Amino acid sequence: MVAHGARLRRTTALLGAVSLLAAGLLGAGPATAREDAPVTARATVVPVRTTGPADRRFNLVVLGDGYTAGQLPRFRADVDKHLNVLWSIEPFASYRSYINVWAVETASPESGVDCDPALDAPRRDTPLGMGFWGGCDAGSVQRLLTVDSRAANALADLVPGATAANRQIVALANSDTYGGAGGTYATASGGNALSSLITPHEIGHSLGGLQDEYDYYGRGVPGGAHQGGEPSSAHHTVLTERQMARQRAKWWRWLGERSESGGVIGRHEGGLYSTKGVWRPSRHSIMKTLGYAFDQVGREVMVQAISARVNLVQGHAPNAQPIGDDRTVWVDTLHPGGGGLDVVWRLDGRPLRSGGARTVDLRRLELTPGVHTLTATVSDPTPFVRDPAVRGSAALTRTVEWSVDTAVVTRATPVTPEFTGHTGTTAAVGAGSVVYADTSHPVDRTLAVQWHLDGRPVSVPGNDRDLDLSALRLRPGTHTLTARIDGTERELRWTVDATPASASYELSEPLRTVMRPGRPVEYVYDGEFTMRLTARDDQDGYVVSQFRVDGDGWYTYYGWPTDADAPFRFSPGGTVLDGLVYGKLGTSRAVPWDDATADFGTHTVEYRTIDAAGNTGAAKSFLVTLVPPAGSRGPSAR
């Protein structure tokens, strides 16, 4: 890996923020447009996931390059895998209802992309001109995968309502070679074992402004000491924990908690390409090591970034002119998967007892004659955010105001009771989902939504637009959920998948297997061993498998970095591949200069699945005991 220094200065068309990838990549953006027929002439826009109008959502636009007409099914499978990995990571899991996904399919005249895997590889005739080596630049790096910026924008512009302000472009290359880039655009090879993990990392850069947490500038070379004062980065500091707490600076609100990506939120040395003199919140997160989650600090930043691309208030009763007190007033909100938004109504500054309802009937308030002020404040109570400034920002709090004049008479116009927005009904929803159903809004009455699960009524007091299925603790199996507008035949129907995907493991042959009552099965090794996780589900969609060792952070299973079909390899000191370290049993090791001391003894390995509906399976476990080598023993299938 090289940095954005001398050897990359020849790549003059790089756009946007330049950042290093966990894989040692450099920031994105590319080369000049090709002078041929318009790239849009052969393109088809496919709505992969529609949660609402494009102009009211954050739009993820996925482009494919180097996929011939016969290979478009492979592109669709790559998109499915990349998305389901994204949905398995917070905050995307909880906020995917804010996100539309569009695939722009363009059949390529030739298969593959330029300079893959080497500079002497053939150039390909492809719509987006994607290429390794920074677009075939001998002064670049092999893993830098760029895309023709004008062609990418032209294709993304085909999505009606999606603009540069509310979209993120992700370009997938038809390649199994590891590569990608970050910045204005995110790129990744579609079929490499690790490529689906690049996407959330790159969105962390381009959407959230998060920085790399690597302690190296070039692969295999320690980064040296940090120079300069306090970084502007939200997740890097030169302060001690005591100073952060005393000054109420950086991630002081999260100090001492177990990190979502493993370990404890504190002060871990290394980051911003420096080995010494700068600290990050967690031992590892997705901004340092692909496979782990965002820690709480990065997650909070990403919640604000995603929410800032949408408006929590999706619609409301007209407020340009004073309204009368002889009508209903309403707001329509977004519907995050982590739980419904709070709505607080106030009349002349005093809270109303509305129970979080989205509609208030002014006739029931018996207002005194005159002019009054009515407000509805919509806020996101997510526990992912602790900073009051973030919680109070427009991303997470919106207020609508009406002037209510009792002298104004409302002119009632007929409004047909109907659903105006709802959770998609074509795919199964998970047992932990929040399902929503919005309705039209007559001025003379409030439309109530009645929910039934398997034919039995479900009580939803107050806000009847959102139903949190996790509160129902559904038994495993398939269920039927309906929502009906009271007094009408208008009904929506969903299939609820309450059965998580299953997972099984296969290990290379151990020295011995130990079975003890009341304990997981134990496997004894004196060196390297492999683990293959296999997921099965009775529903469509790619299933994400995860594992963790000794309670560390959950790590996405991808096979092995060099082969998605190979098992993951554990070893006493880890395996060094291209300057990074994978699979050290026990205390993790990311780079060669991390401690390689073997952690002999017994370790707990847990594994689980996250299916396309968002169901997370219960973790299962087995034990691995690592003993000092007593001779060699070759692995074989168990």
Image: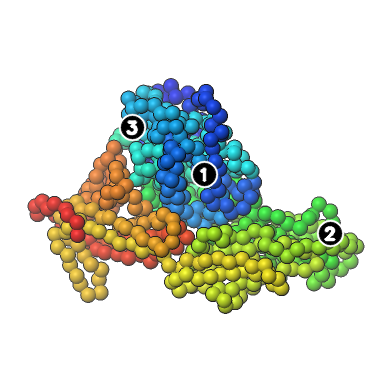
Q: Left or right: where does residue 348 sit relative to residue 476? A: right
Mark 2 falls on what kind of element? loop
Residue type highlighted by circle 1: Ala
Q: For the residues carrying marks 1 and 2, which lies nearer the camera in this image?
A: 1
Secondary structure under the numbered disc 3 in the rendered image: loop
Q: Residue furthest top?
A: 10
The residue at 29%/38% (across/down) is 579
Q: Residue at x 62, y 57 (%)?
A: 334
Amino acid type assigned to the residue bearing label 2 in the image: Ile
101 shown above or below 381:
above
Structural crowding at the residue carrying mark 2, measured as other residues with C-alpha within 10 Å and reported as few (<14), some (14–19) or many (≥20):
many
Q: Which mark is residue 275?
A: none
- Res. 347 in view: no
Residue under circle 1? 103
- Furthest residue to the bottom? 456
> Residue 117 bears which disc, if any?
3
Circle nearer the N terminus (1, 3): 1
Mark 3 or mark 2, earlier in chain: 3
Q: CA distance from mark 3 to mark 2?
A: 66 Å
Q: CA distance from mark 1 to mark 2?
A: 44 Å
- Number of numbered markers: 3
Q: Nearer the viewer, residue 633 or 171?
A: 171
Badge 3 density bin: few <14, some 14–19, many ≥20, Cα 10 Å: some
The answer to whether marks 1 and 3 mark residues whose Cβ atoms lie closer than 8 Å is: no
